């Protein structure tokens, strides 16, 4: 059965014979240079399988989400500029390396985006974090802006915008408008996201071609309630209250 799936649908170690390879649905590809999808490794797919499962309880949902968030943050940091930096090792030899250049901050789209703050802090100690409270209307799925509190010098920083779900794209588009109104240039915004719908990712990438998106997975689509499918349900509820 495994060998009947097209290669893009296969995931698993190459050294196994085709008949023994695990297969899995992997991310949809989208033709936008500014959307970076994490490599579809067996590890990532296993973590996503855990959080997508409706029978996964809250403690496991948090644990496995945090592991994916860490991968997103590490990949996101690869998109920040570095400058050459040469150091001397304890054995007296020089090593030509690099170091990060420029200031950063995180901005979470509340509530679900707050779940990604700790992953960012684990990699960037004492990073400044701003908040934008945007909620989708349950009936219409239209976003509404309630509140924002951002670092004063945000216009001089690289911004890591955090939200695990990109469905219609309405919330993320609104958040970027807030950032741009505070003087943050589009090219200094990096959107870190767990699961995107193809239409959300497309809208976002077309509207902001200079902004980079790092996502773990582009899913199949949206249902009639504008939930991502197959998706994982309501991320905020599963992480915070369920
Ligand atoms: C969810 C999610 C995104 C948004 C995505 O938030 O965290 O912010 O929906 O949907 P969109 O792309 O169609 O705008 P929600 O408003 O449900 O609030 P929550 O974070 O409190 O769960
Ligand atoms: N918000 C979520 O948490 N899940 C979806 O599928 C869509 C929006």
Image (cartoon, rainbow, N blue to C red):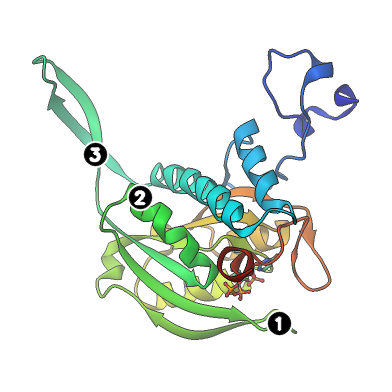
Q: Closer to the camera, 236 or 110?
A: 236
- What is the CA distance from the residue labelled 1 to the residue labelled 3? 44 Å
Q: Nearer the viewer, residue 195 or 102?
A: 195
* Residue at x-position 39% and y-position 46%: 77
Which residue carries the number 2 mark? 122
Specify whether 117 is left or right of 240: left
Q: Which of marks 1 and 2 is in front?
A: 2
Q: Which mark is residue 138?
A: 1
Ligand 2 placement by image quarter: bottom right
Where does residue 17 sit, x and y in percent of width and height?
A: 78, 13
- Label 1 within 8 A of ligand 1 by Cβ: yes
On the question of residue 32 being in view, the answer is no
- Cβ(mark 3) to ligand 1 < 8 Å? no
The quadrant in which residue 117 appears is: bottom left
Q: In which quarter of the image is residue 222?
A: bottom right
* Front-most of residues 72 and 64: 64
Disc 2 versus disc 3: distance between alpha carbons? 18 Å
Residue 44 visible in rendering? yes
Residue 110: x, y in percent?
50, 73
Does 72 sit left or right of 39 as displayed? left
- Residue that numbered label 3 is attached to: 99
Mark 2 or 3, nearer chain start: 3
**Which residue corresponds to the image point at 49% horizontal and 62% vertical from the top-left?**
115
């Amino acid at each position: 059965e495994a060998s009947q799936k097209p290669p893009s649908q296969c995931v698993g170690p190459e050294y196994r014979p085709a008949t023994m390879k695990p297969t899995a649905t992997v991310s949809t590809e989208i033709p936008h240079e500014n959307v970076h999808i994490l490599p579809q490794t067996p590890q990532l797919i296993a973590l996503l399988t855990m959080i997508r499962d409706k029978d996964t309880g809250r403690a496991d949902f948090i644990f496995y989400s945090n592991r994916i968030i860490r991968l997103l943050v590490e990949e996101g940091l690869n998109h920040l500029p570095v400058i050459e930096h040469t150091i001397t090792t304890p054995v007296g030899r020089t090593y030509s390396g690099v170091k990060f250049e420029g200031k950063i901050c995180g901005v979470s789209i509340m509530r679900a985006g707050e779940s990604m703050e700790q992953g960012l802090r684990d990699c960037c100690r004492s990073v400044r974090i701003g908040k934008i409270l945007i909620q989708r209307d349950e009936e219409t799925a239209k976003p509404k802006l309630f509140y924002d509190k951002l670092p004063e010098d945000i216009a001089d920083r690289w911004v890591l915008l955090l939200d695990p779900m990109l469905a219609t794209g309405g919330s993320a588009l609104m958040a970027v408008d807030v950032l741009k109104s505070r003087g943050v240039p589009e090219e200094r915004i990096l959107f870190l996201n767990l699961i995107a719908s193809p239409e959300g990712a497309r809208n976002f990438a077309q509207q902001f071609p200079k902004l980079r998106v790092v996502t773990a997975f582009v899913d199949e689509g949206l249902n009639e309630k504008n939930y991502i499918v197959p998706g994982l349900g309501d991320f905020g509820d599963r992480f915070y209250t369920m």
